[in-house]
Image: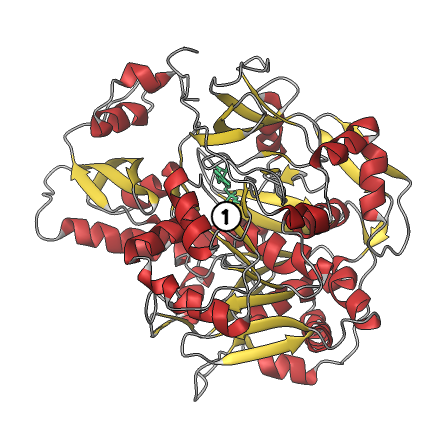
Amino acid sequence: MREKFAVKLEEKRYLPDPRFKATAWMPDYDEACQEHMRDPDAFWDRIARELAWFKPWDQVLEWNYPYAKWFVNGKLNITYNCLDRHVNGDRKDKPAIVWRGEQGEERRLTYEDLYHEVMRFANGLASLGVGKGDRVCIYMPLVPEQVIAMLACARIGAVHSVVFGGFGAGALAMRINDAKAKVLITADVSYRRGKAIPLREIAKEALTQAPCVEKAVILRREAPGVDLDPALEVDYADLCHEAGPDCPAEVMESEDPLFVLYTSGSTGAPKGIVHTCGGYMVGTYYTARNVFDIKESDVFWCTADPGWITGHSYIIYGTLAVGTTIVIVEGTPDYPDPGTYWRLVQELGVTIFYTAPTAIRMFMRYGDEWPAKYDLSSLRVLGSVGEPLNPEAFEWYYHHIGRKQCPVVDTWWQTETGMHIVTTMIGEAMKPGFAGKAIPGTIVDVVDRAGNPVRPGTGGYLVIREPWPAMLRTVYGNDERYRTYWETIPGCYMAGDLAVKDEEGYIMILGRTDDLIIVAGHNIGTAEVESALVSHDAVAEAAVIGKPDPVKGNIIKAFVTLCVGVNSGDGLSAELARHVRSNLGPVAVPAEIEYVDRLPKTRSGKIMRRVLRARELGMDPGDISTLEE
Ligand code: WTA
């Protein structure tokens, strides 16, 4: 298996201008690793002290495999660090959020503005009976109120569960029910490509299946405002208007939950990944500051939606804890034209730009002339996240967006890790195709099934050997599922990715080991799409695979067997696509549907997706079977 799995490693490297290393917060990678190795607790203790705590911790880490407690008995509130600390210091008038809408509208909120908005809305939520530990579901467009809603929950100790605004009613209802959310925060519409998407209508449909929700807060963006149902709905602006202005931050224990965020599982329903207050704050603050090397004058644009972990950690918590100016933009990168992002970089003076390979590959297709039209000289650091940044995309990003002046930080991490784990720290040599090395403070390895390190150049499982502060603490309501992360490979956290290390320790991510498909950077579980398809009357069985795509990384292909008497003509494929869209949202819609008489199965009846995948890709199924879980 080993030899078959050997990977050809590219030799190319780029060395950033020495001034990056000279001025970096973390100028010496090896020295930082050694500091951590000498005394891991002292390392994290030093970082945690850069933040404000109501009461310091008694112990940095209590590790009771596979359960970790970080900053034990420390008391804090993450919003105190994201807001009060700056308002009381010298960032009161600094822009915290610069928002742009699709039609060019702009809103700016200083740290002081954000602080007041968060406190009012936090009081508003409290007036609805939301308190510490209650779950609140946030299903919002990318507007400042989405950020405010998240921070307002954290302010009063409520646990938010943000559901990406592109999900459909079925996906939303499932997430609301799993977390037993008491309140839903949504908006009348979101805007995409000049069209209004009726979020409130989708939410209403979800609520018919989610009786746990007592109240829905509606942000009304359209004029005249839609009529609300007084039994269920409350207007966002009215709620804030009636609420008091001051809301001191609730004192939270380090290990109190901060949020739940759902991510697709390889089997069954999505998993509610639980993050807690103290460790998550320290881990995201540390990585935001050091990986992007954020300086006081930086303008930071992460193009993700706050509905994903990338948005949680590097639009909101990590970045605001550092005190940077964040840019958020509603809409799509190529609307109204493919120069939109580059125009915004120029207009807003963006210095750090963090996006996904799928977007980079899309821009490559549109051509070099689009970025060439704009002045991108404000850019200092480029980031990538969500899937492997293939060498071609790296080269294009580095040359056409970074003009050979900007280090590219390809950050490998997960919803579960909460914070970056692998990257190439600013100033270090970059190797296209490789994400980089373990970030100081984390111990990463590539191993075989038994947990033994594999030779350089040989593929294996990517694992994390020691606990890290922002690690998930459990899967909401399903601790069994949490344990599998740590119990599959003895003694390690198994990420579910395949990787290879080179002689210097640089890690290249090869892909998933399980039935997750990463489509345009979004994790889609095969099981979810299959069950959405099967919920249609015409479908007997369905199997879904990922098929490589030059832009999106993967697309979804579905193999479907139909119920007796149904035929595949008469627009059935379009009908099934609509069905999946309304259930799960546009990201989960199969790009291809093939009708088959039967699906390949094991003797126990398990669908063998790898056989379908191998057939589709013209490979020998035996060759890839060793890669499968
Ligand atoms: C993949 C996103 C290669 C990986 C932050 C991981 C990556 C999954 C990278 C987690 C990267 C993320 N290079 N692959 N830089 N970053 N991935 O939970 O397969 O949405 O396990 O978190 O995305 O996706 P999630």
Q: Amino acid at mark 1?
A: Ser
Q: Is residue 362 left or right of residue 258?
A: left
Residue 195 percent across, percent down from the top left:
33, 73
Q: Nearer the viewer, residue 528 or 358?
A: 358
Residue 475 percent across, percent down from the top left:
60, 39
Which image quarter: residue 246?
A: bottom right
In the rendered image, the vertical position of residue 304 relative to residue 593, given as above or below? below
Badge 1 local density, few (<14 within 10 Å), some, or many (20+)? many
Q: Residue furthest bottom?
A: 224
Is residue 216 visible in this depiction of the protein?
Answer: no
Question: Who's the residue at 34% across and 46% down the image?
Answer: 552
Question: Who's the residue at 44% across and 79% down the image?
Answer: 104
Question: Who's the residue at 32% across and 47% down the image?
Answer: 551
Q: Is mark 1 within 8 Å of ligand 1?
A: yes
Q: Is residue 295 left or right of residue 620?
A: right
What count of labels does the image hold? 1
In the rendered image, the vertical position of residue 100 relative to residue 438, given as above or below? below
Residue to which mark 1 is pinned: 384
Q: Secondary structure at mark 1?
A: strand
Q: Is residue 343 left or right of residue 467?
A: left
Quadrant location, the N terminus: top left
Which image quarter: residue 274?
A: top right
